[in-house]
Image (spheres, rainbow, N blue to C red):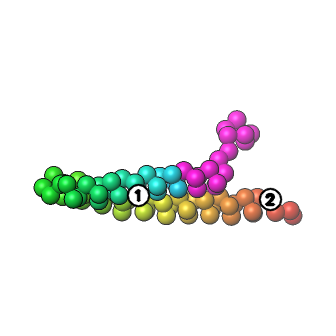
Amino acid sequence: MNRFGVRMMGSELIRQDVRDFEAAVKNLSAGIASASALWKDAKYRELSASVGQIARQSRDLITAGDDCCSAIDHFLIIANEKY
């Protein structure tokens, strides 16, 4: 805990959350892709397009999460330097 009583989150916890999120999005995409053999209507195309949009936005979130973790790691290195 920090001086304000808030539990500190390390970059590893964030990385695990990002990996879990990425796996969920991949699972969703794979499920929709496997349903393509059964569904050939306009609603499926609409659903598929929506999932594609979610996947693109998810890539942005995953990239931001990786950048955040790198910043945390860099900050901790600087914070632990001895002067």
Rendered position, 59 above or below 10? below
- Residue 61 vs residue 51, the one in the foreground: 51
Image mark for residue 82: none
> Can you see residue 32?
yes
Q: Residues within 10 Å of mark 2 (few under 14, many from 20)?
A: few
- Residue 17 vs residue 78, the one in the foreground: 17
Rendered position, 3 above or below 69? above
Q: Residues within 10 Å of mark 1 (few under 14, many from 20)?
A: some
- Residue 61 vs residue 5, the one in the foreground: 61
The residue lying at 82 percent from left, 63 percent from top is 81
- Residue 8 within the segment the image draws in magenta: yes
The residue lying at 49 percent from left, 64 percent from top is 63
Q: Amino acid at mark 1?
A: Lys
- Residue 64 within the segment the image draws in magenta: no
Q: Position of residue 77 (x, y in %)?
A: 75, 63
Secondary structure of the residue carrying numbered label 1: helix
- Sequence-first disc among 2 and 1: 1
Q: Position of residue 41 (x, y in %)?
A: 12, 55
Q: Position of residue 17 (x, y in %)?
A: 54, 50
Would residue 66 be found to the left or right of residue 9 on screen?
left
Would residue 33 be found to the left or right of residue 81 on screen?
left
Secondary structure of the residue carrying numbered label 2: loop
- Residue 47 vs residue 72, the one in the foreground: 47
Say which quarter of the image contains residue 39: bottom left
Please name the residue that numbered disc 1 is placed on. 26
Image mark for residue 80: 2
| Range of magenta residues | 1-17
Q: Amino acid at mark 2?
A: Asn
> Can you see residue 50?
no
